[in-house]
């Protein structure tokens, strides 16, 4: 037992582990909170679309010698507004709009990263070794912005998610709050991509929300339990990833899937026993 | 043919609609509509599917622009103070929301960026839920309730406003007859407290029974006036089956 504690002490004395632990906790919590809104608004695919755009932006930034994070934040935020506008207009269906963005962005990313020495795999699947102190600071800033906005506007976010037309009719400015959620989602995706990877980050947005909706039936409980589930899965995955060489992001996705299946089973069993 | 019969006593109108034309994706769905609604009246807007009823509701709420003419509010009524009971949308099915959460969200129209509720608002919400007989369900999930209970929850949300007008869009679609008549009685008692009611409905017999005025639409007004006058017209006799 004491050997294990010694080993953990040793692990947490390295910057890489501390950084990825901090970033992971912040990203898991904010992604889960935003994910509840995305899932309920049927915007899940927006997260997916944005992560692809984010990958393309990083590839272009590296190819042109810009800072990956600072370059991709505005690009992804602008794309978020475009996807939102396209899904709201009746001419193109929302999922089709997102598919256009995803595939176009992947193509751009593939062309931009050709011939450069970008480590594509670390951006697609994430890597704990890629994190620097400035990543940690940026993530902390994004996560605190998410939490503050979420708490201040919590009731409004609920109302806009539950019944957008009613909010529009009572002058609740649903467009503003949709844009706010999209902007925060864009930020979380950009900063989370280093650790979790472009291809897997949308799982972090949607899985915790889907899992908690299996058992909780009020918005408040769903939000809180999503965050708890997401943190739980991250800590488990981080531990597994430290003791093996499995990537933390793949581990997080599978861990979230396991929780989801378990809760599906529990809710099915519970509804059968009450019948 | 513009029908502009004054309905009821001469008072300041809550809503005044003058020569309104409404269009939906460039197709004109309503023409030459003029009507007014006085304080405390109960107006039913009837007509077939596609007759422009829902478009009119959207225009009153400011969700779509008025192509021509104007819709005016007066006597202390402003658009965001209209208590609105919408048709249920498909997104509400399986939405994790407690009854209390839904009812409380009605108070948001008075708030700006900070969206916290006051304890007074909590008390008021509880009073409204008690009045509508849904207080015992306050912690239950909205999507687990019956259709009639859900309708009462959405009504409770609308009643959180300091209102002079209650606007109801197709309230009884999919409800069974007993629940439907209970719902009409609730609306009647709200109206008798001096709140003007505008109800969009297919149910012409109910409209004749409860409403003080009727607006019959078919992409333009076929009739606007008091319910007793409506029964004297050919349209009224034909649709009411009297």
Image (cartoon, coloured by chain):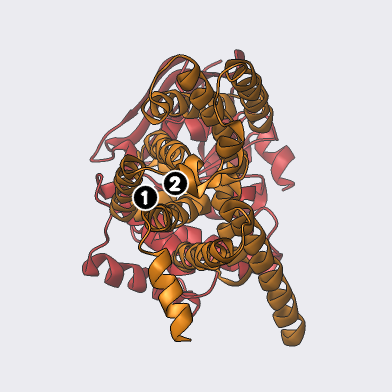
Where disc 2 sits, the SS reads helix
Left/right placement of residue B90 relative to residue A71 reads: right
Identify which residue, A61 or A74, lies in the foreground.
Answer: A61
Residue A160 is labelled as 2
Q: Residue at x 70, y 45 (%)?
A: B240
Chain the render paints orange? A
Q: Residue at x 49, y 58 (%)?
A: B154
Q: Count of labels shown?
A: 2
Residue B12 visible in rendering: yes
Report, in whole angstroms, how far the alpha carbon at label 2 lies from the one at label 1.
Answer: 6 Å
Kindly identify which chain the residue marked by label 1 belongs to.
Answer: A
Q: Where is mark 1, residue-wise?
A: A156
- Both on one chain, marks 2 and 1? yes
The location of residue A28, given as percent across then percent down, is 47, 56
Kindly identify which chain the residue marked by label 2 belongs to.
Answer: A
Residue B187 versus residue B41 in the image, above or below = below
* Residue A78: quarter of image: top left
């Amino acid at each position: 037992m004491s050997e294990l504690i010694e080993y953990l002490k040793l692990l947490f004395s390295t910057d890489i582990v501390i950084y990825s632990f901090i970033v992971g906790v912040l990203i898991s919590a904010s992604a889960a909170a935003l994910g509840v809104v995305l899932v309920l608004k049927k915007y899940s695919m927006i997260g997916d679309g944005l992560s692809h755009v984010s990958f393309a932006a990083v590839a272009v930034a590296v190819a042109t010698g810009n800072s990956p994070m600072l370059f991709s934040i505005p690009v992804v935020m602008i794309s978020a507004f475009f996807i939102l506008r396209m899904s709201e207009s009746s001419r193109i269906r929302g999922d089709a709009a997102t598919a256009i963005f995803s595939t176009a962005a992947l193509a751009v990313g593939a062309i931009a990263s050709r011939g450069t020495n970008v480590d594509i795999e670390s951006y697609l699947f994430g890597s704990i070794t890629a994190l620097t102190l400035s990543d940690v600071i940026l993530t902390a800033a994004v996560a605190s912005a998410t939490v503050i906005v979420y708490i201040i506007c919590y009731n409004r976010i609920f109302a806009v998610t539950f019944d957008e037309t009613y909010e529009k009719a009572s002058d609740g400015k649903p467009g503003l709050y949709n844009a706010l959620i999209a902007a925060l989602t864009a930020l979380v995706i950009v900063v989370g991509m280093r650790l979790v990877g472009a291809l897997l980050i949308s799982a972090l947005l949607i899985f915790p929300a889907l899992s908690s909706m299996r058992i909780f039936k009020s918005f408040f409980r769903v939000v809180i339990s999503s965050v708890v589930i997401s943190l739980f899965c991250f800590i488990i995955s981080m531990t597994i990833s430290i003791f093996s060489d499995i990537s933390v992001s793949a581990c997080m996705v599978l861990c979230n899937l396991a929780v989801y299946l378990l809760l599906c089973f529990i809710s099915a069993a519970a509804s059968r026993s009450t019948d | 043919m513009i029908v502009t019969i004054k309905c009821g006593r001469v008072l300041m109108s809550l809503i005044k609609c003058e020569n309104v034309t409404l269009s939906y994706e460039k197709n004109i769905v309503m023409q030459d509509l003029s009507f007014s609604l006085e304080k405390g009246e109960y107006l039913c807007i009837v007509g077939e599917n596609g007759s422009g009823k829902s478009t009119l509701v959207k225009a009153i709420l400011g969700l779509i622009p008025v192509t021509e003419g104007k819709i005016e509010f007066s006597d202390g009524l402003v658009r965001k103070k209209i208590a609105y009971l919408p048709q249920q949308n498909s997104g509400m099915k399986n939405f994790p929301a407690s009854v209390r959460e839904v009812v409380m969200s009605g108070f948001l129209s008075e708030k700006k960026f900070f969206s916290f509720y006051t304890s007074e608002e909590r008390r008021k919400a509880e009073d409204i839920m008690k009045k509508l007989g849904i207080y015992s369900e306050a912690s239950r999930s909205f999507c687990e309730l019956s259709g009639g209970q859900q309708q009462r929850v959405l009504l409770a949300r609308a009643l959180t406003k300091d209102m002079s007008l209650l606007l109801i869009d197709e309230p009884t679609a999919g409800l069974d007859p007993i629940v439907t008549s209970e719902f009409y009685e609730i609306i009647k008692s709200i109206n008798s407290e001096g709140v003007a009611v505008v109800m969009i409905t297919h149910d012409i017999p109910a409209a004749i029974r409860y409403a003080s005025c009727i607006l019959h639409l078919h992409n333009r007004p076929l009739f606007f006036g008091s319910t007793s006058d409506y029964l004297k017209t050919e349209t009224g006799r034909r649709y009411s089956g009297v």
